[in-house]
Amino acid sequence: DPVLALNGITKTYAKDTANPVTVLQGVDLSIAAGEVVALVAPSGAGKSTLLHMAGLLDTPDGGTVTLNGQEMTGESDRRRTRARREDVGFIYQFHHLLPEFTALENVVLPQLANGVSKAQAQTRAADLLARVGVGERADHRPAALSGGEQQRVAFCRALANEPRLLLADEPTGNLDPGTSDQVFDALMALVRSTGMSALIATHNMELAARMDRVLRLEVGQLSAI
Ligand code: ADP
Ligand code: ADP
C-alpha cells in the first residue's frame, strides 16, 4: 500500500457565492513508503489546500484520501484526528515552537501526549536533536536559538512520534539561502534515516531536484516534471 493516496480530489472555496474559487480539479497522487516527493506550485495554486487535505486537516468536496491503506474521507473527526496525530508530522515555514519550553521539552511534549514515558521521550528527543546538529542547544528556549536552529528543533518535534508521513510547507523558506541549504540537508538526512515518506512544498528548484520526484501543481492538477 502507498503511505498516502489522493484520488480525484476536488475543492472549491466560496461555493455558494457569485465568485467561487476552484482550487483543485481532480488531483491524483500516490506516495510509496520511503519516498520523498517535492511539490512546486506558483503562489495561490492551492499548495496549502492540498497539504491540508493530505494531513486530514480539511476535507475535499470530492475524491478520496487514503492514509496507510485506510480511506479517511468518510471517517469521523475523532478518527481523522487520531490518524493525524499518529501518522502525520507537520513542518511549516515558521517553527511554531512553544516559547516557554526548552528545545528538548518541545520535542518531549508531543511524545508524552502520545503516552510515551518521560525517560523514553527525553532519550529520543536528545537523540533527534543531536542528529540534526543542535544537541548542544537542547536546554535553550526558542528565543535563544538562531532561525536555522529553531527549524531544526521543529523538524525533531514533527518526527518525535515517528509518523509515517511528513508534510512540509516551505520548511526552509524563512531562512537566508546559505543557512537554508544546510538546514535542508539536515532535514533530508533525518527523513532518509527514518525511512518515512514525505511531501515537501518548496519554491527552490535546486532543493526540489534533490528529492525522488518533483510534482507541479497548476490550474488545479498535478503533473510530473
Ligand atoms: P497556496 O498555498 O498555493 O498559495 P492556497 O491553498 O492557500 O494556495 O489557496 C489557493 C487559492 O484558494 C487562493 O486563490 C486562495 O485565495 C483561495 N483560498 C484559500 N483558502 C480560502 C478560503 N478559506 N476561502 C476562499 N478562498 C480561499
Ligand atoms: P494536537 O492537539 O495534539 O496538536 P491536532 O490534531 O490539533 O493535535 O494537530 C495535529 C497536527 O496538525 C499538529 O502538528 C498541528 O501543527 C497541525 N494542525 C492542527 N490544526 C491545524 C491547522 N488549522 N492548520 C495547520 N496545521 C494544523
Image (tube, helix red, strand yellow):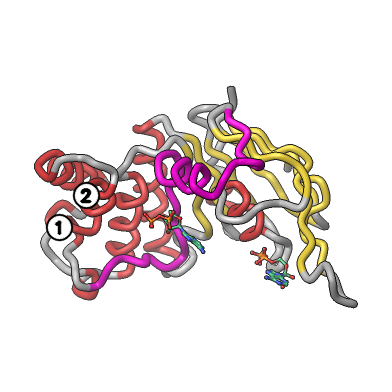
Q: Amino acid at mark 1?
A: Ala
At 52% across and 60% down in the image, what residue appears?
Answer: 170
Given residues 104 and 176, the one toward you in this image is: 104
Looking at the image, is 125 positioned above or below residue 49?
above
Whole-number angstrom distance, CA of label 2 to CA of label 1: 7 Å
Please state, as top left, top right, bottom left or bottom right, where the N terminus lies in the image.
top right
Badge 2 is on which residue? 129
**Residue range corresponding to the magenta coloring:** 70-99
Badge 1 is on which residue? 138
Q: Earlier in the sequence, mark 2 or mark 1?
A: 2
Is the CB of mark 2 within 8 Å of ligand 2?
no
Circle 2 Cα neighbour tier, 10 Å, few/some/many (<14 / 14–19 / ≥20): many
Q: Which quarter is ligand 1 in?
A: bottom right
Relative image position of residue 38 (x, y in whole percent) = 59, 46
Circle 1 Cα neighbour tier, 10 Å, few/some/many (<14 / 14–19 / ≥20): many
Under circle 1, the secondary element is loop
Relative image position of residue 126 (x, y in whole percent) = 15, 46
